[in-house]
Every structure is written in C-alpha cells, then in structure tokens.
Image: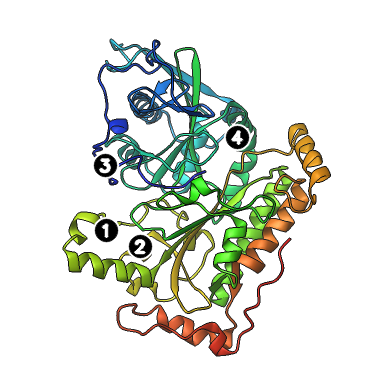
Amino acid sequence: MATAGTVSSGPTSSSGSTGNRKMASSEGVGSSSSSQTIKKTIGHRGLDPTGETTYKKTTSSALKGAIQLGITHTVGSLSHKPERDVLMQDFEVVESIFFPSEGSNLTPAHHYSDFRFKTYAPIAFRYFREMFGIRPDDYLYSLCNEELIELSNSGASGSLFYVSSDDEFIIKTVQHKEAEFLQKLLPGYFMNLNQNKRTLLPKFYGLYCVQAGGKNIRIAVMNNLLPCAVRMHLKYDMKGSTYKRRASAKEREKEVPTFKDLDFIQDLPDGLLLDPDNYNALSKTIQRDCLLLQSFKIMDYSMLVGIHNLEQAARERAGEEATGAADQKRPAPPQGQKSLYCTAIEAIQGNAHGTRALDTEDQMGGIPARTAKGERMLVYIGIIDILQSYRFAKKIEHSWKALVHDGDTVSVHRPGFYADRFQKFMCNTVFKKIPRKHFWCYSVVFVSPEHYPRSPPISDLGLVTTSPSVR
C-alpha cells in the first residue's frame, strides 16, 4: 500500500539514525550472511541477524543505495534526449545499465556488490512526471539528495516501502506480475491522464528493477498519499466489503494501526460529513475512477483514508508546549507537495473553503470534513492496490469463498460488481453530504480553529444520522 507510515524505529528524519537506515559500506546489493538465516519473513521481506530489513535477501540499506544510484543515472541520461511526443513503442522500451562496484566510464564506484539497473518506459514516465509538474532536478533532489526513509507499517503484502525525505514520493517494491500488469496498463493509463489529471488513482512516476544476486527487485515510484508531516490520528484501508474486514489484534498494537471497513462502521457510524461541493466532486471522481478500473478488469483495490483530527492536534500541541517537548517532537512545517493534482483536495477538484486559515496542516491538501459530534477533520484519501487483474486465480478464489460465505460480502469479486459496491460504500457510508441549509455551521468552524468554539453535533441540527446497513 502506497502510504506514509511510521519509520522503522526512532523519529522520522531525513538523515537517518537507526540501524536499518544506516548505509553500511561493506554491504553488497545482493548480499546477506550466508551462515545465518533470516529470522522472520513476510513474503519476500525479512530480517537479517542484525535486525535490518531485507528484501529477497538484499539488505534495505544496500537496496536504497542501488535505487538512488540507478535513478540518478537514468534521469541524467534522459536529459540528453530531446523532448517529443510519446509513441506506442515507448511503452515497451527497457533500458539497462550495469553498475560494477569499481565503477566504469558511465557509472560511479560504490560500496555495494555489482548490480544491474533497469528502467521501464523512460520516455513515457518522463512525460507522466512533466504532466504533473515534476521537473527532472526536483525528482532527483527528492529521491537522491538525502537517504530514503524506510516505513515500518508496510502491511501484510511483504512489500518494502520508502518515502523521500521531503515527503513527496513513495517507493514500493512490486511483484513480477504487478510490474508486468502495470506495463500493459501504461498506454491506457497514459490516455486517461491526458484526459483527466484529477483522479484518486495512484500517480506512477517510474518503474525500475534492481538486478543482483540472481534476484530481480522491481520498484515503482508513486505519489505519497499520507504525508508524514501531518499526524494521522486514524487510518483506514477500505474495500466496501465486510468479510474479515477488521484489523487484526497485531495490527491494533501499532502506534498508528490501519483499520478496515468494519472498524470504520464501528468508529464512525455516521461517516465523514463533507460540504455539498466537496461531496459532489468526490462522488464524481470516485465514479469516474471506478469506471476506468472496471474497464481494465481491475479489482481488489482499496480506498486509503487518513484522518487528521484538528481538535486532537490542538490538544497535543498544547500538551507539548506545556511540557516543553514541542520543538523536539514536532516535525518541520510541511512546505506543500510540489506535484500538481496530487493532494486530496486537488484530486477531486474540491474547494478548501477557508482552510488556508488553519495552521500548517492544510498545506498538504486535506479535504475539510467533520463528524456527527462536530469534530473537525482533514481527510487524505487515494485509491491504492490497483495492480490486481480479475484473472483465473481471482475467479477461483471468489468461487471458493462464495461457497463458504455470502459471495456478495467477500472482497474478491468480479470487477463490475466490485466497482459498484466500492462506489456505494464510499459515497453512502464513508462520506456523506451536509445539506446546504446547514452548511453555514460547517463553513464557520473552518475559518479559525483557534478562536471558534466547537460546533454543535449534527443531531442538534435536526439531521438524520442513522447509518444504512452494510452487507
């Protein structure tokens, strides 16, 4: 999942101070201690005897170094190629460069084992980046100027996630089938972006492969949905399904757990309330995105929802200031994302309605919302995990689950039904519209959070807050 979680250990910082973020000069890209076995693995992700994260037996620090060396080279080489329109054959191009540890006339010397770096569709992805206003020097600076930060809350997929030090990009390891599917998806993805840049779908900025030690480690560079600079008080991964859609006991032990559909219904039975304009814009965006995903026979995707509670944040700041810990704990103020159409409010073409008066949180583009109790929220959202095609394996999986359980409640379903159920759940259960006649109260509370009292509960305004039953 493309999300900014917590750093593996210790506070988030760009320089890195923990063991699994240290660049060990003696490590090889494909190396691991052959005499010792990995203690714990989830998919291809594991731990070496020193406690450092590994992926396909490659240490995280070595993988980060190889990624930065490779991207620096490929982006630099692109600068020598003239700007031109994207051709169909550009989507099939794969460029490869070998990085010997001693260096060559094309590559610098490095402290890792030899590796090969592959870049998929470099011209096409350059166009994608330009479409979102990402200049080559900004892309390089974000990803390669400082060490990538490893995220520990990587989910159950076994993927590794890194975030750039400026909070702009997420790097995720992807499986061979996912990378293959993304390559096939690129022409249609390109056409959709040309027609509509405002979307909740992932923005893919690059697809690469580090080849070392007989293993291929494929990575995708995407937009960061949940900025680390904004504290997420609640986080949900929702599919519109209720079958086993509750966070596990182990997940709940985390500092910021990722909850699921049933947890949301329990925590926020009346949903997140949006002003009419933002609700309509969000509904249209979800409808358009679901239609596109259905046309590509894509399914099993999720809506990632991060919630920043303004009242709770104010209490936390007051507590930190009272104890003198504010300067030590609070991250540097976010400067706002540089990419175009990549914040939640921009993605739906929504209106911030006065949120520029908020402290610094709104600079990352959260959607203003509130709960039925009157709590003010900033919501960060995006559709994730779209690289799942409804093929034979998924059909078998759905058929088996449907025999044991109600087929309409399981998350693995045919694309058309999945898209319709997903859309209804998001637009009827998760997000709801405040009627215009009561909108005055909503708009006032977002003018100045420091000076206005908490607004009355929605129930006091005479609104019906009963949540519909969800299958």
Q: Which of marks 1 and 3 is nearer the N terminus?
A: 3
Q: Earlier in the sequence, mark 2 or mark 1?
A: 1
Q: Give coordinates of residue 151: x percent, y percent.
A: 39, 41
Q: Most extreme residue toward the left, as rendered? A: 324
Tell which tag, 4 or 3, sits nearer the viewer: 3
Q: Depth check: 373 or 266 in front?
A: 266
Inspect the image, locate mark 1, and give the three-letter code of the amino acid beneath it. Answer: Pro
Q: Quadrant of residue 286?
A: bottom right
Question: Tags 1 and 4 in contact by the CB under 8 Å rule?
Answer: no
Q: Residue at x 44, y 20 (%)?
A: 57
Q: Please name the residue that numbered disc 4 is placed on.
A: 182
Q: Quadrant of residue 278?
A: bottom right
Q: In this view, does 60 lie above or below 464?
A: above
Q: Please name the residue that numbered disc 3 is placed on.
A: 14
Tell which tag, 2 or 3, sits nearer the viewer: 3
Q: In this view, does 91 lie above or below 339?
A: above
Q: Depth check: 210 or 312 in front?
A: 312
Q: Please name the residue that numbered disc 2 is placed on.
A: 363
Whole-angstrom CA distance, mark 4 to mark 3, is 30 Å
Whole-angstrom CA distance, mark 2 to mark 3, is 20 Å
Callout 2 secondary element: helix
Q: Residue at x 74, y 37 (%)?
A: 394
Tell which tag, 1 or 4, sits nearer the viewer: 1
Q: Please name the residue that numbered disc 1 is placed on.
A: 333
Inspect the image, locate mark 4, and give the three-letter code of the amino acid beneath it. Answer: Leu
Tell which tag, 2 or 1, sits nearer the viewer: 1
Q: Most extreme residue toward the right, as rendered? A: 403
Question: Tags 2 and 1 in contact by the CB under 8 Å rule?
Answer: yes
